[in-house]
Amino acid sequence: MEEFTQRQKKIGGLLQKDLADILQKAAKDGGMRGVIISVSKVNVTTDLSVAKVYLSVFPNGKGKELIEGIRSNTPLIRHEMAQRTKNQLRRMPNLEFFIDDSLEYIDGIERSLKREEDPIKEADLLAKRKKK
């Protein structure tokens, strides 16, 4: 497990708050009604050059389409973030967006524990977790 400095955590928190605001507004303006985007985590590298942004999307089915749209608009999002944080940050880190699938993963474990689905009898239920 990676340990983050106080500065990395502070910058991550600042970015998380502003990114959530920007993405929610963009989704609403883009006509995506009923879609909830939350920024679940922002990890900033030690040299503060890259911020890995993990997004939770509800409903789950919209995630792939949404992340592609966000990735294609990263320069615009980064510019907006730079405008918002110009008094706190000298340089805006590069933004990398990922889907946070931890809620789906937890949900699958709960279903298995409740015996709704049995991954031992149905091996195809065991999706391999990818390292990020």
Image (cartoon, rainbow, N blue to C red):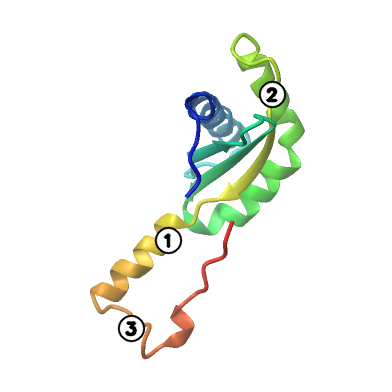
**Mark linked to residue 126:** none
Q: Quadrant of residue 104?
A: bottom left
Residue type, label 1: Glu
Quarter of the image for the C terminus: give it: bottom right
Label 3 belongs to which residue?
118
Q: Amino acid at mark 2?
A: Met
26 lies above or below 52: above
Residue shown at 49% from the left, 57% from the top: 101
The residues tagged by marks 1 and 2 sit, at their Cα atoms, a distance apart of: 31 Å
The mark found on residue 92 in the picture is 2
Q: Looking at the image, do the residues carrying marks 1 and 2 touch, with CB atoms under 8 Å apart?
A: no
Q: Residue at x 63, y 44 (%)?
A: 97
- At horizontal 60% and vertical 49% (from top left) the residue drawn is 98
On screen, residue 72 versus residue 36, left or right, reads right
Say if 100 sits above or below 48 in the image.
Answer: below
Crowd class of label 1 (few under 14; some 14 to 19; many from 20; radius 10 Å): few
Under circle 1, the secondary element is helix
